[in-house]
Amino acid sequence: MPDYRYIVADAATGEVLHWNLPLSEVEFGPEKSGPGSFHGTLSPTFARSFSDMLDGGNTVLLAERNAQLAWGGVIWRAEPEGSKLPVEASGFTSYLHRRFDLHGNLDGRGPYIEADPCQVIRDVWAYAQDQPDGDLHVVVDDTKSKAKTGTAKDPYTSSKTDPRNLGEMVDEMADVDDGLEWTEAVTWHGNRAERRIVLGAPRLGRLREDLTFTTGANVTGEPHVIMDADEYAQWVIGLGAGEGKKRKVVVDGVRNGRLRLEHQLETSEKDEAKLKQRTRRERLARQVLPTLTELEIVDHPAARIDTLRVGDDVRIRLHEPHTEYDGWNRIVGWTVRPGDGETPERVTLKLERTVKPEEGEDGAEEK
């Protein structure tokens, strides 16, 4: 069984306050474009002696698996419930949701015109950590994207008289079309944990042909495959920019022996080739009927837990009594439940389709 350890450190200095916090009922994990979360409990035996150390908003919790850091974040809540002491933490980016741009335009880093949203995120973190007592020692990747935010007529700005929440600014950058995704990582550098924001442009992860998840090998529990036809369609009508006779209309579809279902895709595309590409991509995405949003797995040579990466596309094969499934899904996060006694370690993958339908007018490249 893997060896887990929970470490408490000072948020500002990184100094380790305790190397092995005795937590039980632990669940934690990362997520795509979000901070992830941690939940654990101190038993009555230890709650009194450790309660002062778990200083909400001022201490960091690190989760280690087999001597490798697996998660890190800020403790926000440690409030007794009866004789137990539940401990709740969120990833480092949750800190930005407690901070605001008090100077406007991130103290001269903006306004932003045709700016890379990756750079805006770096500037948000730099601004937050430049302020007195605000340095969380978070490092942001130097990744660059091809996306742009702000225009000459409508710059991306923040006003001193209407302070913007720094966490919301990061969320807005992750929502820029074909821009970026992010997640968090922690690694040991000596006795200090490097706290890092990992940027992916336009997306995190890659196709992982080296990882497989299969019934009878590393899939456990009862996988819940949803057969929902609300978004299903094998015919898509793509509508481009313009009105009336000037508007370009593209139809993409196939006959597959099922009752014909259609979907209308509204876009602002002026280029007919791009409209055809988006329409075909939408049809391929909507022609997939089964949906798998979660999958419980165990550590296995086919896919080691410590090799999982947020954003990766993996193949899943299910041969259950009531379910047959074989498809590619994208890992958008996971929750770890460490083993305890005879209870084995469990990991619940959070999934989405590798190719999924568009939302609104947001586009995406076909895989």
Image (cartoon, rainbow, N blue to C red):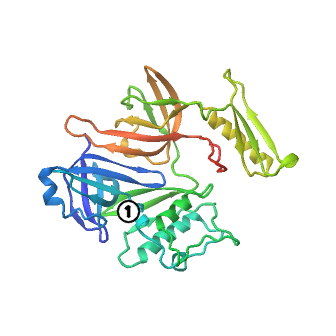
Name the residue at 46% across, 73% down: 126
Which one is nearer the viewer's eye here, 214 or 103?
Answer: 103
Position in image of residue 198 (x %, y %): 47, 58
Quadrant of res 193: bottom left
Answer left or right for 120 relative to 66.
right
Position in image of residue 366 (x %, y %): 65, 43
Q: Which residue is mark 1?
A: 195
Say what amino acid the circle numbered 1 marks. Answer: Arg
What residue occupies the far right of the structure in this picture? Answer: 245
Q: Is residue 240 above or below residue 256?
A: below
Quadrant of res 321: top left
Position in image of residue 267 (x %, y %): 72, 49
Name the residue at 48% across, 68% down: 165
What residue occupies the far left of the structure in this picture? Answer: 45
Secondary element under disc 1, as helix, strand or loop, is strand
Q: Is residue 25 above or below residue 153?
A: above
Which one is nearer the viewer's eye here, 327 or 128?
Answer: 128
Name the residue at 62% across, 32% down: 232
Which one is nearer the viewer's eye here, 169 or 15?
Answer: 169
Answer left or right for 195 relative to 312.
left
Name the residue at 46% across, 27% down: 318
Question: Is residue 28 shown to the viewer in this render?
Answer: yes
Position in image of residue 281 (x %, y %): 67, 40
